[in-house]
Image (tube, rainbow, N blue to C red):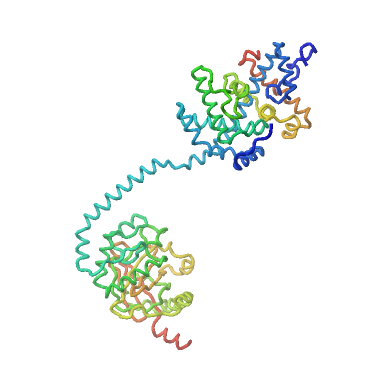
Amino acid sequence: MAPAPLFASDDARILDRIRKGDEGALADLYRANRRPVAALVRQHRGTSEDAEDVLQEAIVVLWERVKTGRFEYKAKLGTFIYATAKNIWIRRLARSRREPAAAEGNGENPGIDPDPLEILMDDEETRIVRNALEKLGEPCKEVLLLFYWEELSMEEIASRLGFANADTAKSKKYQCKKALERLLEGALPRYG
Amino acid sequence: MDESSGFHIADDQDRLARFVLGTLSDADRRSAEEHLAGCDACAAAVRRERVLAAGIRRLGRDLLKETIRRQTSYQKAMEIPWLRVAGAAAVLVVLVGVGVIARWFVTKPEAEQVTSDRTEQAPTAVGEQPSIGPADLRSESAGKESLPSSSARREADAAFRPLEKGAEDRQAFRAKSETAPTSGVAAAGNLTSETGKYTDKLKAAETPLHVPSVFWTEGNVISAVEESKRDVGRDEAESRALMMRKDVAQEGAAAPKPQRFAAKESAALYQIQQRPAAALPRERQAMQQFSNSVQTKIEQRGNVTTLTLYLDSLANESDLRKANVETLSDDSVVVNLGKQKIGYRLPSQKQEKRDESRE
C-alpha cells in the first residue's frame, strides 16, 4: 500500500516527535483534542474526569502505535484521537451495561480497529497482572515493559539496561516472566 | 511448524510473545494460526500470554497517562474559569456603580458650593499630585496607593483657590506634576502607610525659597521649640551648605544653577510632604551621616515648591496639616513639623552671586 500523504505539517511534526520519544508531544495532543473529546464524552453520559481519562487513553494508543510502527496515517491525528476516544468510551459504556460494544471494529473509523490486546486492556484479569507487575520491582518491571509494551528487541533491551548482550537480556526476561507468573498463580486460576 | 512436526508455539516463548504482540511476519502468523486451530495446549498458552501482555501494557499506558497528567496539571491549574471571572466582574461593576452614585449624592452639595464661584473646572488627570486633602490622607493611611477622589480634589481645590493668582498657575502646576513621576503619590507605592502625606493645602511662602528646580539637601532636627528662631546651628549649617552646593553641582545639566521660582513673590506657594527614611534613594541613604539630619528633596514646579522630608519618625496627620516654613534669612529656613523643627541652609543669593562672579 502506498503511504498516505500527510494531511497537515503539524501532524507530521507531532508524529516525528513521538518517534523520537518527545513526551512534550503528549501535552500538545492533549491541549489540541481536549474540547472535542470532552464534548463527546459529556454528550454520552460521561463526566469531565471520564473525558480526561478517555482522551489520555486515546493519546497513549496513538503513541503506542507510532512507537511500535503500527500506525498508518489515514486521517488527521485529531480524527484518529477522536475516533479512538469514542471507541474507548463506547466500550466502557457497554461493559458497564454488560453489552457488546456496537461501534467496535465496525470499520467506520480510520485505523483504530482495536487489536485483541486492546480489547483485553480493561479486563479484570489484566488489572491483576498490572498490579502484580508493580509488585515485581526493578529491573524486572523495566525488562517486561521494554519487551511487551515498547516492543524492543533483545539487543535494544540489552543496550538500554546495560546487559552484556541480547542473550543476557533474553535470559533476564525469561526469569522475570516466570517471577510474574508465580505472583499470579494464586490470583489467576489459569496460572495455577 | 505444526503439531505433526513436533513443534509447538507454546515451546518458543519468543515466538509466542511476538504472535501475541502481532509482530510476527505474515507468513509466520498464518502458520501459527493454523497450528493453534489443532493444538488446545498452544491455544491456552496464547490466551495466558495475551493476558500477561495486556497487563504489562496496561501498566505502560498508565505510566504514560501519568506523564500526560503531570504535563497538563500546571496548564489546568492556570486555566481561568471565565464564567466565574465574568460573574465576579459583573458584581464588581455593580458595586462600584452603586458606590459612585452614592458618593455623588453625598458630595454633590459640597461640589456645588465649591464650583459655584469658579470660572472654570480644574483638570482631573490621573497621577494628579498637588494639594491632597484629608480624604486622601485617610485612604493612604490604609497603606494603599490611591488617587485623589473627586471630592478630595474639590476639597483640595477649594483650599488652593484663595492662594492662587490665576487658573494658569494651577494648570501649569498640574501639567508639570503629571509628568513628574519621582514624587507624589504615584512614587509612593513601596512606602509605608504613613507615606505620601502632604500638608493639607498649599501655603503661601513668607519669602520665595531661592532654590534650583530640583535638588537634594540635608536639614538638621532642632529638638527644642525655643530654638526655632536660632540660626540653625551655624557650624553644622555651614557644613550642610557646603554639602548642598555639592549636591546642586551633582544635579547636572537639569538644574545647574539656582533660579527664582516665582516671578511674583506673592504667588509663591509651597507644600510639605513626608516619607519614611527607609524610602530614600540608595545614593541618598549613603549620605545620611548624622542621626539628626533629614535628607530632603526640594522640587520647584511652576510657582509651587514641594519639600519632601525623609524622616525616621513621621509626624502625625494633625502636625502635618499645621506644618509651615519659616524663613530666617535669605539662606536659612526652618520647617515646623509639629514637635520637630528642621533647619536648612539653602544656597544664598549672595553665594550665588559669588559663584557667578568666580565663573
In the rendered image, residue B88, in percent from the top left (x then y), is placed at 36, 44
Classify residue A102 as left or right of residue B232.
right
* Number of marks in the rendered image: 0
In the rendered image, residue A21, in percent from the top left (x then y), is placed at 65, 38
> Is residue B230 placed above or below A119 in the rendered structure?
below
Q: Which residue is drawn at 75% across and 22% down?
A: B27
Nearest the viewer among B235 and B134 is B134
Classify residue A20 as left or right of residue A168.
left
In the rendered image, residue A142, in percent from the top left (x then y), is placed at 67, 30
Nearest the viewer among B125 and B256 is B125
- Can you name the residue that lies furthest to the bottom here? B357
Classify residue B169 as left or right of residue B66.
left
> Is residue B13 placed above or below B75 in the rendered structure?
above
Classify residue B13 as left or right of residue B103.
right
Nearest the viewer among A185 and A121 is A121
- Can you name the residue that lies furthest to the right here? B5
> Is residue B276 placed above or below B15 in the rendered structure?
below
Of the 4 image quadrants, the one containing the C terminus of chain A is top right
In the rendered image, residue B55, in percent from the top left (x then y), is placed at 62, 23
Viewer can see residue A141: no
Viewer can see residue B179: yes
In which quarter of the view is residue A109 placed?
A: top right
Of the 4 image quadrants, the one containing the N terminus of chain A is top right
> Is residue B124 placed above or below B92 in the rendered structure?
below
In which quarter of the view is residue B129 placed?
A: bottom left
Q: Residue at x 52, y 24 (%)?
A: A90
Nearest the viewer among B41 and B39 is B39
